[in-house]
Image (cartoon, coloured by chain):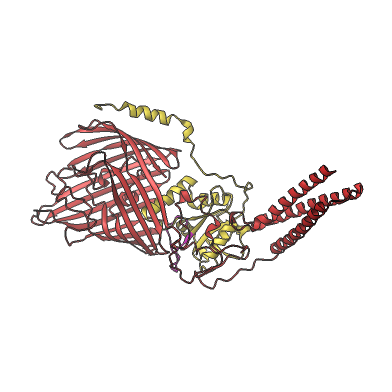
Chain colours: A red, B yellow
Amino acid sequence: MRRRTLLIRAVMNAMVVRVSKEVAMPFRFANPIRALSSASRTAAVRRVSSSLLLLGAVLTTVSLHAQQTSTPVSSTDQHTIQMLLQRIDRLEARVAQLEEQRQAPLQPQVVKQEVATLTPPPDHITATPPMAAPSEHPAHGPAMPSPVAQQGADSEQHVEPDVSNPEPERMDMSKTLLRMRGFGDVSFNGADQKGSTTSFSLGQLNLFVTSDISEKFKFLGEIVFESGPDNFYEVPAGHKNEFAVDVERYLLQYSYNDYFNLAVGRYHTAIGFYNTAYHHSTWFQTTTGRPLLFQFEDTGGILPIHNVGVSASGRIPSGSLGLHYVAEIGNGRASRSPLEDEPVQNEVDENNHKAFNLALFARPEAIHGLQFGFSGYHDLLTPLAQPPIGETILAAHGVYMMPNFEWLNEVVLVRHSPQDSSHVFNTTGFYTQISKRWGSYRPYFRYQYINAPNHEPIFPDVGLRAGPSVGLRYDAAESVALKFQYDYNQMRNQPGANALTLQLGFTF
Amino acid sequence: MLRRPPSLIIVLVLLLLGDGSAQKTVRASADVQNSVATDEGIAIVVNQENTVENLSMKDLRSIFLGERSHWGNGRRITLVMMEPGQLERKAILRDIYRMNEADFSRHFLQGLFTGEVFVSPKTLASPVGVRKFIFNVPGAIGYVRASDVDSTIKVVRIDGRLPDDKDYELRMQPHTGTK
């Protein structure tokens, strides 16, 4: 008999635990993902009701069984049953409360202040401790991961109830505001160019950092660790195989509206398309690297890829034409004099003349993915022991980019005009790149061309460089891309060079 | 011809590409409980204070792509997405983004990287979460099934139509209307 009583008690306890969980779950605000919708709340009520009926049946059975056996119930069991009955009363009250809430129409509260006072909606159980301020103001809310990392991490926890915040721009020092994403690549490459060896190469390790400082302000930075010496127009700087750190972008952005955004710091100059569409990550790029035309300054590039200054950008009211503008003023690029100096003038400009750049481009609504535009850049270079040289860079582009197909075309003209001479040195360059994706595979082709005059005063060592590249990108996973590329590079007064590269690019 | 043919590179490529099993794209396809797809409309919802009543499909696409980041009154747009695997999200990716999950992630990652997208979307797990968020954030815009709409949020017309209208474009199942 004792064993039977214990068995009944075990069953009853299990039922009570189940009923307790069923009822308590919707109110567990600490895990609001489980907060019930109207439908699921109804289901919960039904489950609770069923459980109570079952529990009642068990209790009735216990009672009848006790009467039939005429065995006196111990005081402990009586106490347990009494507790269970009390608990049932409480649960019944909770069920009634739930049903009442389900039947009552939701009465919206009126938000009196736009941002300052935030309250949960009426169907929201408010037995929660106060948390930080609105999610729209990331300075108050939790750090927001990038989309990939964010999925699953972001949840209703972003909804912070019952908070009155009279200072919408107040910074919450208790939370980190930094979001970080990394990019990297490792390559295995070989070429038949004189002096080259077949090598494994570590590419740039890029830490991309953003922070929503407030609703209008945001920080964006790229901290890049890269190995190998810099190569400023064939003049190596630094030591082979040594890692160095570069802050490639360093921007404070202010977003007033869609028509006016301001950024101050170090940015990628809006010359053409590629330079602002792709930064220091090979994973984003279809190919293993940037076109020759848009090589970075420290790897022999001819354009002022980076600039330190102020940039304004936004849409231009233009209806379906989708016009945009970018206007920039900055230090511009150093004049390569002396050659080993850092080309990007991060701290000191070599003259008082600032570099100006204006870009206009259109994204017509009628053809999604199409963008075409042009840009004009002007600066004054003051190399040592030479007269100042005016630098004008004109660029035009037409690109069509869709997830499964891309076709990029850009042409650039660089004009250097020494002020003591009427002679103008024109360097022209272009590239075209086309690719199509089939599943995880994306074959691509690129042809590129740069032609600098032999006596070009700023980069006499560039000369003619042209040739095709063909390759295959294979997305092994959403965040990992394997690329295999063949390049042929024709150079003036030199034999052509073949190169093969196998590259693994990734983001993390 | 190559002076030193890097045959090792070619061998590595063949080995890596030969693994067909690796072709499967990793995707967070959470098998949620939304097992029954219906022809129910998906409502585009905003905060009750938002004065916007109607959006064209082009404007909506522009907002969801992050190309537009502010409402007319200057308030920043905060986009709310449901978690991957939710049927509502699949319908939005199909009808508005015309992308799969991988392309969607890449789009916003690249947008943030270039600076063109000011803020990435919030991801919420349930319609209740979406309602709560939009109720609390004046600049928020998101989506829920029409049956999940309540009076705490405001439904925006798309091309002048509401989810119950015949030619409404955003539905759980691909739209087969006349438009």
A432 lies above or below A94:
above
The rendered magenta stretch, by its main secondary structure, is classed as: loop
Q: Quadrant of the C terminus of chain A?
A: top left
Q: Is A88 positioned to the left or the right of A175 in the image?
A: right
Q: Residue furthest front?
A: A75
Q: Is residue B76 magenta?
A: yes
Q: Is A495 positioned to the left or the right of A17 in the image?
A: left
B7 lies above or below A398:
above
Q: Is A249 positioned to the left or the right of A175 in the image?
A: left
Please name whichever residue, A50 or A389, is drawn nearer the observer in this view of the structure.
A50
- Tally of marks: 0
Tell me what residue is drawn at x 30 percent, y 28 percent.
B6
Residue A91 in the image: state x and y as whole percent: 74, 58
Q: Quadrant of the N terminus of chain A?
A: top right
Please name whichever residue, A423 or A303, is drawn nearer the observer in this view of the structure.
A303
Please name whichever residue, B37 or A362, is drawn nearer the observer in this view of the structure.
B37
**Residue A252 position by quadrant:** bottom left
**Residue A346 position by quadrant:** bottom left
Please name whichever residue, A19 or A36, is drawn nearer the observer in this view of the structure.
A19
Asked whether residue A358 is in view, the answer is yes
Tell me what residue is drawn at x 17 percent, y 34 percent.
A494
Tell me what residue is drawn at x 36 percent, y 27 percent.
B11
Residues rendered magenta in the picture:
B64-78
Q: Residue furthest bottom?
A: A112
Residue A92 in the image: state x and y as whole percent: 76, 59
Residue B103 in the image: state x and y as whole percent: 45, 46
Asked whether residue B160 is in view, the answer is no
Residue A201 in the image: state x and y as whole percent: 31, 36
